Amino acid sequence: MAVPTAPMGPSALGQTGPGSMASWCSVSSGPSRYVLGMQELFRGHSKTREFLAHSAKVHSVAWSCDGRRLASGSFDKTASVFLLEKDRLVKENNYRGHGDSVDQLCWHPSNPDLFVTASGDKTIRIWDVRTTKCIATVNTKGENINICWSPDGQTIAVGNKDDVVTFIDAKTHRSKAEEQFKFEVNEISWNNDNNMFFLTNGNGCINILSYPELKPVQSINAHPSNCICIKFDPMGKYFATGSADALVSLWDVDELVCVRCFSRLDWPVRTLSFSHDGKMLASASEDHFIDIAEVETGDKLWEVQCESPTFTVAWHPKRPLLAFACDDKDGKYDSSREAGTVKLFGLPNDS
């Protein structure tokens, strides 16, 4: 079915004049008061600490809605949960049960005790940190690679390697709907209002469906190449997409137009996260740094150094702390052995 196409995003590279790349990437006159304040904070809180989480690489990290816990999912087929104490993460539990890699996980949007994991073993599992038990295992049709929980907490959407997205009732654990897409589905997300469902795809488009009807609303040509990840800002004003062309584009939620782009990375953008106040955007790739931008200007606010490609980033829901995980190798003993660590940036330099 043909759906209307919105104005081109940063894929309109050949244009000049208004709406061209130059006007999107305009440089502002000087750092804002917010940028200067955050830079001052990070000068005293630029420490990154590592915490051993898994026996193989970490694919996904996510904070509970209250910020008390961080969960990680790994190639070692497990999930780990840490408690955030003053300036460190303390491992609380390791969650076993999946028969294959845990590729993505997310928490319930308003219940800080529940999280869900997506695995290549053709299941998703819902876990409760109070009992440390798996409260539901839902069988799906394919190897699952991405997952999200609806803002109202009622539905879990899971996407698999065959580009099927299944909508699962979070209470009954039964499938409510299933959609097979004709394009490569990368990341999936509801908007904050819960009435639209977004998919990024391999052709560089953002596909938008009405929810719960799942009828096509719009398809946006966002990037000239594979559109990889998507995140909504907690304030509901913007969403951001990252793509294989190494650009991050920022979109107005209501107008569905690109308002600016961030172009400091050189490699495909794998992961994005907005800070709790919606004012900072972290983006990461195979570049050996994580870019932290001011959302309103696109200006560089900070960069977090890392020694290898970054798979996943997540800002804390209340504080300027960034959790992330990289393709680390354990150089001390064996340079080919994966380290399986979770990292935390934004800690006091003297901690």
Image (cartoon, helix red, strand yellow):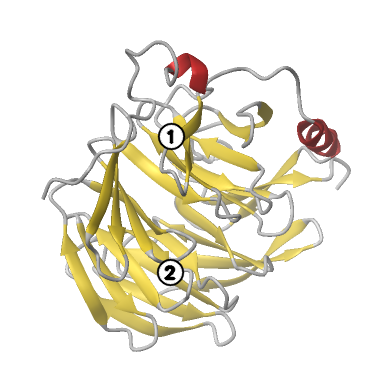
Instruction: Estimate the x, y position of residue 244 in percent, counting from the top left.
Output: 35, 30
Instruction: Estimate the x, y position of residue 170 in percent, counting from the top left.
Output: 39, 81
Crowd around label 1: few <14 · some 14–19 · many ≥20 (10 Å): many
Quarter of the figure with residue 227: top left
Taking the image as drawn, is residue 34 in sight? yes
Task: Name the residue that disc number 2 marks.
Answer: 150
Judge from the rendering whether residue 215 lies leftward or rightward of residue 106; answer left or right: left
Viewer-proximal residue among 123 and 318:
318
Q: Secondary structure at mark 2?
A: loop
Q: CA distance from mark 1 to mark 2?
A: 24 Å
User: Closer to the observer: label 1 or label 2?
Assistant: 2
Callout 1 amino acid: Val
Instruction: Estimate the x, y position of residue 224 in percent, counting from the top left.
Output: 29, 26
Viewer-proximal residue among 226 and 237:
237
Crowd around label 2: few <14 · some 14–19 · many ≥20 (10 Å): many
Callout 2 amino acid: Ser
